[in-house]
Amino acid sequence: GENVEQHPSTLSVQEGDSAVIKCTYSDSASNYFPWYKQELGKRPQLIIDIRSNVGEKKDQRIAVTLNKTAKHFSLHITETQPEDSAVYFCAAKAGANNLFFGTGTRLTVIP
Amino acid sequence: NAGVTQTPKFQVLKTGQSMTLQCAQDMNHNSMYWYRQDPGMGLRLIYYSASEGTTDKGEVPNGYNVSRLNKREFSLRLESAAPSQTSVYFCASIGLAKNIQYFGAGTRLSVL
């Protein structure tokens, strides 16, 4: 089955700096890659996703890039703010298969 | 439109007790899932139901059973709770039209 690895497990950045979280996947058939944000005590919520027919997608301060050849994808957050502090999960899905999640990255934005 | 609703939000059990976690979605989704979340281990799939009437094991099914009661409801049962089952449990659902998976608010379970 699919194996998704996520790095780093923790990340601290100064407010205003950029944050990058990286994930790799093993199943070349995977074609959907969402990112979820989970605030303390809350449920995971989708913040951005990308499908395998594009290499990059951007939504305001958040962007995701995908390299299908290398089987890795990354989340980029620019101009970080304290409210960006949360745990971020990447995931990968192949067709109708289930989502496979990474182990999460705890992002702390220091004011 | 409430999305995915889980009950209860919190539960404390003694070792050996049983309980059922309830989940319902009102988005007409075909697929439903139960995950457990433990520190540093992300979201691990316990069981899933790809459609009404079907259920399948996920990554960590031991000690759990599920029932897909109808298209809306998917319950998770612990027959004899163990301390290792202390965790936060999330139910989720996903539709066919989009791949977006929606999560319930979670159930925080402690087994003493």
Image (cartoon, helix red, strand yellow):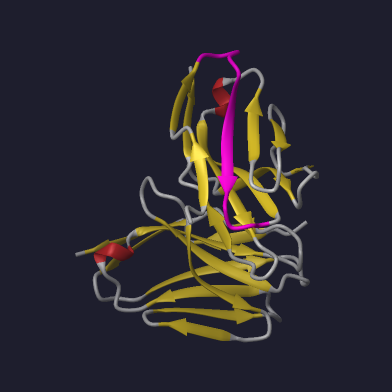
Query: Which quadrant of the figure has residue B94?
Result: bottom right
Question: Who's the residue at 52% across and 84% down the image?
Answer: A57
Question: Who's the residue at 49% across and 62% down the image?
Answer: A36
Question: Who's the residue at 57% across and 26% down the image?
Answer: B84
Where is residue A60 drawn, in percent x and y?
A: 38, 82
A18 w.r.t. B24: above or below: below
Q: Is residue A75 left or right of residue B101?
A: left
Query: Which quadrant of the figure has residue A19?
Result: bottom left
B63 w.r.t. A47: above or below: above
Pick the residue in front: A88 or B17: B17
Pick the residue in front: A103 or B53: B53
Question: Who's the residue at 60% across and 86% down the image?
Answer: A55
B32 w.r.t. A20: above or below: above
Where is residue B3 drawn, in percent x and y?
A: 51, 54
How many marks are shown on the rendered structure?
0
Where is residue A10 drawn, in percent x and y?
A: 41, 56
Q: Is residue B93 magenta?
A: no
Pick the residue in front: B57 or B75: B75
Q: Is residue A83 left or right of residue B28?
A: left
Where is residue A96 drawn, in percent x and y?
A: 76, 64
Q: Is residue B19 magenta?
A: yes
- Range covered by the magenta-colored residues: B14-29
